[in-house]
Image (tube, grey):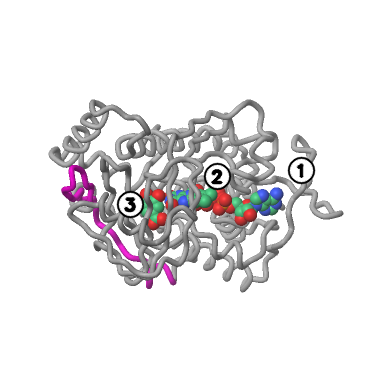
Amino acid sequence: MLVGIIGAGPAGLLLGRLLHRAGIDAVVFESRDRAHVEQRQRAGILEQATVDALRTAGAADRLEREGIAHDGIDLVFDGTAHRVDFLGTTGARVWIYAQTEVVKDLIALRIADGLPLLFDTPVTAVSDLDGRPTIHYGDQTLTCDYIVGCDGFHGITRPLVPGTGYELSFPHSWLGILADAPPMHHELVYAHSRRGFALASMRSPSVSRMYLQVDNGEDPAAWPDDRIWSELARRFGDHQPNRGPITAKSVLPMRAWVAPTLRHGNLFLAGDAGHIVPPTGAKGLNLAVADVVLLAASLAERHRTGSADLLDAYSDSCLRRVWRAEQFSHFMTTTLHVVPGQSEFDTQLQVARLRGIVSSRAAATSLAEEYTGITPAS
Ligand code: FAD
Ligand code: DHB
């Protein structure tokens, strides 16, 4: 069996690794160069199931050494911090290990194994999806048994499945920064304030990753470092950021989109090509990993036994989990962000919702369950 994988983000790289371990050949095509793919700043939180998948794939050596386990988060509202305990309520935890590092580890393994990974090679088209599907790149083609679109939200495969996707845009964006400054707290802090949302995360004991709600279309150049630090300070209340040189600054729009199906003939979609979430619940990378774990098992069953049962169920199984993650991400986003022109009534409802979470063990447990891992509904 030969699988053509379009995209060397976490979805495509992990799929390639899992297929190799199942004895299935794959070629990974990536439009950008290696340095670009390894340095693109994105997600930072891994659910336990994601860590387990990387362990099973033999790709967790550095993660075991450098990943930072988090057993809860702080929620700040009305200027006061309240802890939500994950480990104590659910027995589960999450890990800080940046997407850049996951990608670096998977690329290094694929290269060490001598497996095909073509950087600077954009796929321009795919054809014959109902027969022997074919990938077109440069002036060449590769005919496969299956093609998997792991080419993200701006790739070429997302529009190729039948039907129209389901979309929701939000009236705000995030300004994300990296700073050479120790994290302001040992766990993540999600802050609701009347000036807008803020999030304090980290990349290491000496590097902070912080996000600030800003208007759509905001220019990062309008945010000199001093303005960022003073705005963060006003939004975090009890906790206060440690200042340090800001080394990266970018604005991220927030959008939700779900494909109507993750399959067209012998083309499958996985990861951001099939669905995106607003980042407030830290689900994007974890969903991408869950997709490819299931897809790899489905292709392995097909390869080993000839049965297509798992492959036929792939899209529905993934979309059930995706919609639960959309629901959680939407809940976190709408509970913590202040939309332009929002009434005081709506703000009070948000604060009441947050107070409900931190004053009820049942409500806190529910948030902890969804934050630490979403399993597909049966
Ligand atoms: P991607 O990582 O997007 O990888 C797709 C790959 O396909 C890319 O390398 C791309 O270059 C390649 N490609 C595209 N078109 C082609 C083509 N025609 N031919 C060959 N290759 C192609 N999630 C969080 O949880 N927290 C965050 O803070 C967060 N921040 C994010 C910031 C940004 C700017 C983005 C875009 C996403 C963010 N996410 C975040 C979501 C998370 O990073 C994604 O869910 C995750 O990257 C999905 O992995 P993927 O492999 O499906 O897609
Ligand atoms: C990070 C990003 C998120 O969207 C989130 O909810 C938590 C952490 C991060 O980049 O570290």
* Residue carrying label 1: 126
Q: Nearer the viewer, mark 2 or mark 3?
A: 3
**Most distant residue in the left direction:** 359
Q: Nearer the viewer, mark 1 or mark 2?
A: 2
Badge 3 crowding class, 10 Å Cα cut-off, few under 14, some 14 to 19, many 20 or more, is many
Q: Is residue 79 left or right of residue 48?
A: left
Q: Is mark 3 within 8 Å of ligand 2?
A: yes
Q: Which residues are magenta?
A: 62-86
Given the image, on which type of amino acid does mark 2 rest?
Asp
**Nearest to N terminus: mark 2 or mark 3:** 3
**Residue at 30 percent of width and 65 percent of height:** 183
Q: Is residue 121 left or right of residue 303?
A: right
Mark 2–mark 3 Cα distance, whole angstroms, equals 22 Å
**Most distant residue in the right direction:** 139
**Residue at 72 percent of width and 61 percent of height:** 120
**Nearest to N terminus: mark 3 or mark 1:** 1
Q: 171 above or below 8?
A: above
The chief SS type of the magenta part is strand
Asked which secondary structure carries label 3, the reply is: strand
